Image (tube, grey):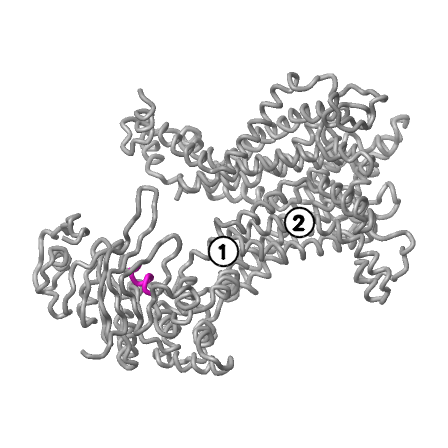
Amino acid sequence: MSAVRRVLRTLFSVVLTFLGLTMVTFFIGRVIPIDPVLAIVGPKASVETYARVRAEIGLDLPLPVQYWRYLTRVLHGDFGTSVITSQPVLQDMLNVFPATLELALLALFIGVALGVPLGVVSATQRGRWPDHLIRLVSLFGYSMPVFWLGLVGLLLFYAKLGWVAGPGRIDVGYEDLVPTVTGLLTVDALLDGNRDVFINAVQHLVLPASILGYLSLAYIARMTRSFMLGQLRQEYILAALAKGLRPARVVWVHALGNAWVQLITVIALTFGSLLEGAVLTETVFSWPGLGLYMKNSLFNADLNAVLGGTMLVGFVYILLNLVSDLLYPLVDPRARSRA
Amino acid sequence: MTAPPLLTVRNLRVTYPAAQGDIHAVRNVSFTLARERLGIVGESGSGKSTLGRAIMGLVPRPGRVAADELRLGAIDLRNLGESGFRRLRGRRIAMVLQDPKFALNPVMSVGHQIAETHRAHVRGSARAARRAALEMLHAVRIRDPERVFGLYPHQVSGGMGQRVMIAMMLIADPEVLIADEPTSALDATVQTQVLAILDELVRGRGMGLILISHNLPLVASFCDRVLVMYSGRVVETCGAGALRQARHPYTRGLLASLPELDHRRDVLPQLQRDPAWAEGA
Amino acid sequence: MSGAGLRAWLLDPVPASRRQARIGRWYRAALAFGGNGLAMAGLLIVLALVLIAIAAPLIADPQAATLQSLTDRLQPASWAHPFGTDELGRDIFARTVFGARITLTIVALVGLIVVPVGLGIGLPAGYFGGAVDAVLMRLTDIFLAFPRLVLALAFAAALGPGIVNAVVAIALTTWPPYARLARAETMTRRDAEFVQAAVLQGASRASILFRQILPLCLPSVVIRLTLDMAGIIITAAGLGFLGLGAQPPAPEWGAMVASGRQVLLDQWWVATIPGIAIFITSVGFNLFGDGLRDVADARGA
């Protein structure tokens, strides 16, 4: 496949998925709800008011026209106004998203930094006790409801042991002490050189990030193990051993080097599921991110905000797919020469 | 020949435990290898590849290797352990595998893979390893070593891939090379080329070569001596020139089923097998 | 027939009839599965869950599950309340036992939606190929690219909370992999000789799809479903935790954890016990599914 065709194909699929995403949110927002007009005008409005408002928000138009309008608005970054905050939803989301990102990035780091080595060890020790132990740890991880693990974690490490700080992103006394640059509180505190804020932020971050990190570790370790078992059966492993390389080098350089090709997709998927898991984790930890924002909107019937959040997470999903496509050539020379 | 053999094998056995009783992949095989080219022929499943791997200490778990005598020069290979074997592999004894498409690491450049063997056995800088790898690429008659050094396995042809494989296995100067079906995955025209390079290097460096193949004529024309294996056992040993006078019914059967240019046969003879051969009758 | 004779009949490498061959194949699979300790543990957990759900009224007092008794609020474990009581004085043991019914209902309903939808899209896509395949698979890819919990959340938000809506929301984001699986299985069998034989006999396309190909796709679809069960249970519990699943006073495990959150620090058992129930159930399904897959892989290899 030529480079041009490859790029076109990827773009085509990105555009199509994006259209699908907007169609679904449009469908959820405009077709399913009982009566959006009624929600605005209230049950006591006259028939005339009702009809006027209905026309104003374009509900008298045919569905395709309504969708087209919706799509144009979305493409201009207009997700409507939040009922709770009276601010544009996009503005709200930009405010809260960095908190989610900070949590998800640290969790992903924990998941990859521990999950990949554990998966490798599990595969090379197949059938022996380290393998059994790692598989058990990982089985528990993907069998555990994250919200429950969060609560148990709070109970143990915050309430009983006092090792970490409680819910929230930072203690009240430290709020707004450092200027917002990246939106990632720990990074901003470092940039500002404020040690106290940094330490306090880390104390808040470490438990929710570890819990999300454990869940991604479980999945990444499981997939790494299965990819590594596949690679260790290959002929080039035999050749590498016949050359007289150390087994450690054969495993960590040769086999893992090939397993990375498959792991990239897994890591992208994990990052996506971390953003999702944030809805539950942020609820448990009162973490002021996108998940908590969506959850609060949900209970205040703020459909614009909920759908905006859905769209944002969906959009990040599409981006992740794109990024993992673009990263392939870095680890796989076969993809390089195809591109 | 008065020089001590490079490799001595006496009553080598390889067993895999299985639910229905042990599977004997190699049964009491004995031979010695001097500075010569020894061919091992047999059908697939005859244990010839397992034999090669057993000598390299590369029989995977849960397979077991046992022998009354297994020596590389003066070194006893039987209780060597993994780290002892590692120092010998590549340095004193190496192995060329069948298909470079699978036997070369797809995400590492071929030059890097050759230099890696050098670095595993010879102290020195990365630059020295690179220089040695380029010389080795030249030695396997690759015209533009600098360019080929940076190529990845999927970018080289089968014949070139196999030459890379040979370079990778010979760069640390081993004295014994086991070539396991080194040309079976290649086009017929490339086969002779690769064999010629292999021959030149093995002779030039005074090495012992074990050529494992299912291809009887190839082994007969290329090697000095031939072992014929059937069901894990050596059923015949003879000089390559004397193959036509082979006595064992299995060898005769193999010879008889070869196509011949000078006269047509209407019925292809069927290879007869007798379970008693496996028991050493 | 003696025990040994039956065993020999079952394991006969040269079965005398189709029936014997089929039963023997199942027997060998069962033997392989039974030899896997963890898989058997998973099966036991799943069976226990089903039994508890069916026999719930015999195990615990049905009224105790919803009966509020403010004088008995937040009691620790005792003989009368083995798992203690919650913030409304309800017996947590009874609620946990009856919660098994809700969990199994959700899982079963999701399975009942997802399998037919997945097959309905995957079979024609794999069998007809071409434009049909392209359209159906694009659709599948779009849904596959969606964030699962978030989409379920949006659906639940639009449809209103409730167990049926939670099921629909989960099903909507679960079916795509089934369509892909069914498509792949169909494509490998589309040109098989027994299919060509059926074509020569004049079988219609529908009959080939339903009678020849569908039965062969079912095993892998069922295994996939078993592997997904734990994920479905956890997602459902998550929706319940957010208040989007079964509505109070129904004893849904996720909602029970949520209600225990307020009293977590002093009465830890209120939130912890239902969480353990979710955890054990999903471990059971994961082990069971892994075991089934191993048996299937070994048979395919």
Question: Is residue B50 rendered magenta in the image?
Answer: yes
* Residue A283 horizontal/vertical position (percent): 78, 42
Badge 1: residue crowd in 10 Å (few <14, some 14–19, many ≥20): some
The reply to whether the magenta stretch includes residue A147 is no
Closer to us: C32 or A312:
C32
Q: Which residue corresponds to the image point at 79% horizontal and 58% vertical from the top-left?
A: A184
**Which quadrant holds residue A108?**
bottom right
- On the image, the x and y values in percent for residue A40 come to 86, 34
Tag 2: amino acid: Tyr
Q: Earlier in the sequence, mark 2 or mark 1?
A: 1
| Residue occupying image coordinates x 47% and y 71% | B109
Q: Residue at x 50, y 34 (%)?
A: C40
Name the residue that disc number 1 marks: A124
Residue C222 - label: none
* Magenta segment, prevailing SS (helix, strand or loop): helix
Name above or below for residue A19 compared with residue C16.
Answer: below
The reply, left or right, for residue A150 in relation to residue B119 is right
Q: Which residue is mark 2?
A: A214
Q: Where does the magenta region start and end?
A: B49-55
In this rendering, position of residue A61 left or right of residue A268: right
Q: Secondary structure at mark 1?
A: helix
* Residue B228: percent from left, percent from top: 19, 61
Amino acid found under the numbered disc labelled 1:
Thr
Mark 2: secondary structure: helix
